Amino acid sequence: MQIAFLLIGSYLIGNFLTATVVGKSFFQQNIRTEGSGNPGARNAGRVFGKKAFVVTFVGDAMKGALVILLAKWIDVDASLQLLALIAVMIGHIYPVFHKFRGGQGVSTFIGGMLAFSPLVVACFIGVFLVLYILFKNFTLAGLSAMALSPLFLYLLTKEWPQTLWACLVIAILLSAHFGDLRAFIQKKGRLN
């Protein structure tokens, strides 16, 4: 019963979209009708400025961190902690209170992974910096570095169960960015 409450609660926490609150409270605008229409940190930054980006990023990251810290507090194993991260990300990407139209989950993922394993986050930040120099594309470098998170986790822990759950976390993250990845590939194809 405790696990069910954790997962349902994590999903519902994910439904809190910081960008919508920032837009309505400070700018009297609906983020869904501005810019790309995505209620995430990047669009909030483009539409409302740097402070809105930071507030949205931190707010969405705190959701991921909160569910991991809650899972650790009730003393569930690492696999269930990652399952809670999956639930909060699904809540963020497909929020029932916002007609299943949410953000893309990056901030929530980063906050959750930071609470779960700061060393994994340190690894993907390092890889991101290298890949950004190579690709000159923020989204592609970021997603590629995050996609390597399960590998970093396995190298640090040598634990297969949590590594497999981490693969599922990444699959959800990448599926939310399918449109971005397809646009990047099409753009590269036109340039070649």
Image (cartoon, helix red, strand yellow):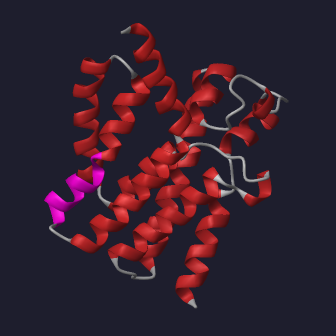
The quadrant in which the N terminus is found is bottom right
Image quadrant of residue 43? top right
| Position above or below: 148 against 155 | above
179 or 6: which is nearer to us?
A: 179
| Magenta region, main secondary structure | helix
Q: Residue at x 55, y 65 (%)?
A: 87
**Measuring 27% from the left and 46% from the top, which residue is drawn there?**
148
Q: Which range of residues does the magenta coloring cover?
A: 148-157
- In the rendered image, the vertical position of residue 61 relative to residue 157, given as above or below: above
- Residue ranking furthest to the right: 28
Residue 115 lies in quadrant: bottom left
| Picture residue at 50% right of the left edge, 44% below the top | 107
For this view, does 136 lie left or right of residue 42? left
Queried whether the magenta region covers residue 154, the answer comes back as yes
- Side of 104 where 23 appears, left or right: right
Residue 186 lies in magenta, yes or no? no
Horizontal side, residue 151 vs residue 32: left or right: left
Q: Is residue 72 visible?
A: no
Quarter assignment of residue 63: bottom right
- State left or right for residue 77 relative to residue 20: left
- Residue 190 in sight here: yes
Residue situated furthest top in the rendering? 191
Report the residue at 39% width, 20% height from top.
Answer: 137
